[in-house]
Image: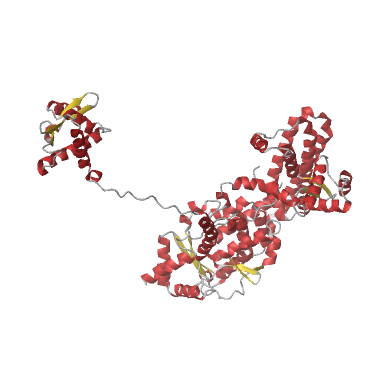
Amino acid sequence: MSSPLDQAPPDHDELLDGLASGLLPEQVPDWPRAASLLPIFGLARSLFSRSPADTALKLIVLLALAKVEGRFSRERIRTLVPHLAEDRLEAVVTSLYGGGWLELRASDNTYRLRPLALYTLSVLLAADFEGQSNANLLIRAVEAVAFGDRVDQGTTGHLLAVLLGELETQAEQAREVLGRGTPRQLIRFSRHEVGEQIRYVTQVLSTIEERMDASSEHFSRLVRIHESLQQILRAHEGLSRRLAEWSLKRLETSDAGYSLAALCDAVLGASDDELVQVVADGTVRAPAPSVCLVTERLLTRHRTARPTMAKEKAAFVYEPPPLPDVGELALEDIDPVARVAALLASLLEQGADDTTLTRAVLSSADDFADAVYQLTLLARLEGRSTAEGVELAPGVVVRLSGQTVAARDLVGMDREEALQTLTRLGVLVDVPGRGLHSTLRVQR
Amino acid sequence: MSGRAAELANVLLRLGVLDRDDPEQAALREELFGDDALYEDVSRRLRAVGYELVQMLGHVGVRLERSAAVEPLVTARNNLGLDARHVRLLVYLWVQLLYRHLKAALREEDDEPRGRTQTLLGLEEPDNHDDEPTLPRAELIAEFGEFLSKTALKGALTTLKKQRFVIEERGVLRAGPAMYVLIDHERMEEHVVGLARRGALALPEEP
């Protein structure tokens, strides 16, 4: 059973040519949604073949056919749409058939509206585009997302007629393949269409069950649907028997290996998945691409990049970068010790006492490690005061309080014990609310 | 010689297969076939990095070793960029252009008295293409008519020609060097015959 999506697949290579180099359609974000809309736009494209008047005439015919059940011979279409000139009507029907709106059954030369066409028309009519404001259109677009597949109870008869039509087409296809199919078509039908059609039969049956209570008057249609189902199943049984008769002997010829015709039929009848497996399991093993620049790829990139670059060039507006900061670099900007010294000097100018100085330095510490870092800065400042005579202000140098503690004195102590020892010796002081700190004393 | 072996290994990795119709590549091929020690050295170097040096009916090239070709190939789109359409065409052409040719070569090889250089190992294979099977492009188009449009078939064929799986001259197709070298012919035969047997037994797919 062919899917509606099968009718107009875009050419893969042409798509690749249209995409930036190295990009696959599947990697484009909106590709799945675009691909799902392609069949509908394939139908729509066929409406715009000649002129707006031609489009209008085609729509008139389509809408007339959509209201009526069953299949349409040319004569019946002329009866249903008597408002069009006969020769024009003939041309319109031919064009609609070529455009995929109508499906032709070869056995009796009758048409029917394809399900996709019927659905497209229904959706477009239900959308009610006429006289809508922009705001209304937007609201409807949002509501359409939640529209789902509501079906009016009154349309049950019509829906059953459509299902019957679809089923009859399947039965016709199965009969045709059984009667005139080539081996490769038999293989394809036997291995793929059976599953698809059984699934389809199940769907039809479940739909019938759902609607049985409201549709007793459609009994004759149900009988015909069952007949179609029977035909499909019988066709498949016959098809399997024919394939079994097409025995393995056909494969083998004298001593030249297997029959080429049989092998080619098998290849042409195989599914895509089976064939891709041939390469995926390493039967074809090309070397991995080397790290190199291929001229062809370079040319492709050049060709695709040039228009893109031209567009970007047109849109580009030069903005000068912000001016760099050219202010004088002070010692405090690069030396953390000098920064601490500058902080202390400014606080001293404001008359701060030792405790205030201690807190000013240590209160900025986020955690224990940072506090240690700050203490290290102070120690280095003290060292500079001693060794180099660096003064915070004239005659003012930094001294850290407490006794000198050798590292070996703390060996073997745990953290709490070490902290108590340091506090007892006056190296650390418990600042209320701030925890343990080393005190800072300014020697004036 | 070690330097020359490294150079040849490098060239083979870049080109994949050597084209017999290209004079420069044909000279490289002659050089490889003319010196057993050089051939072994190049083969060893390639084997050390997961490739195998393959010669088949006078064609020579490099392909991944089977043990090295596991993960990257188990994808829908392989490293050759072949999708199902390309693969169907490739397998069909393999059947039409190579299957019988390989069978005939193997039969001849079996018939040869022992001690003579095997045909599959190359040098004795004549360089003209007179005995290679061909397929008219028009016939291919007719066969694939129900699967692909002419444009789509042309696109797929172009891809295979770029990969050097097939060569077209004046509307006639013949197997390219990549079809000889990059395909594991035993496995391909297993696959194709498997497809045919399943078709004959009419095993339907699970719905």
Task: Give left or right: position of B53 versus A331.
Answer: right
Q: Is residue A352 visible?
A: yes
- Using the rendered view, name the quadrant where residue B151 is placed: bottom right
Relative depth, front residue between A173 and A117: A117
Which residue is located at x 83 percent, y 41 percent? A70
Q: Position of residue A435 (x, y in %)?
A: 23, 26
Task: Give left or right: position of B143 versus B8.
Answer: right
Relative depth, front residue between A69 and B72: A69
Which residue is located at x 16 percent, y 40 percent? A380
Image height check: is B129 above or below A195?
A: below
What colouring style does the render use?
secondary structure
The C terminus of chain A: image quadrant: top left
Q: Is residue A414 visible?
A: no
Q: Position of residue A181 (x, y in %)?
A: 75, 54
- Using the rendered view, name the quadrant where residue A79 is placed: top right
Relative depth, front residue between B90 and A15: A15
Task: Give left or right: position of A157 versus A294.
Answer: right
Image height check: is B39 above or below A40?
A: below
Q: Residue furthest top?
A: A432
Image height check: is B37 above or below A180?
A: below
Q: Position of residue A68 (x, y in %)?
A: 83, 40
Image height check: is A270 above or below B17?
A: above
Task: Give left or right: position of B26 versus A223.
Answer: left
Numbered label tally: 0
- Using the rendered view, name the quadrant where residue A373 is placed: top left
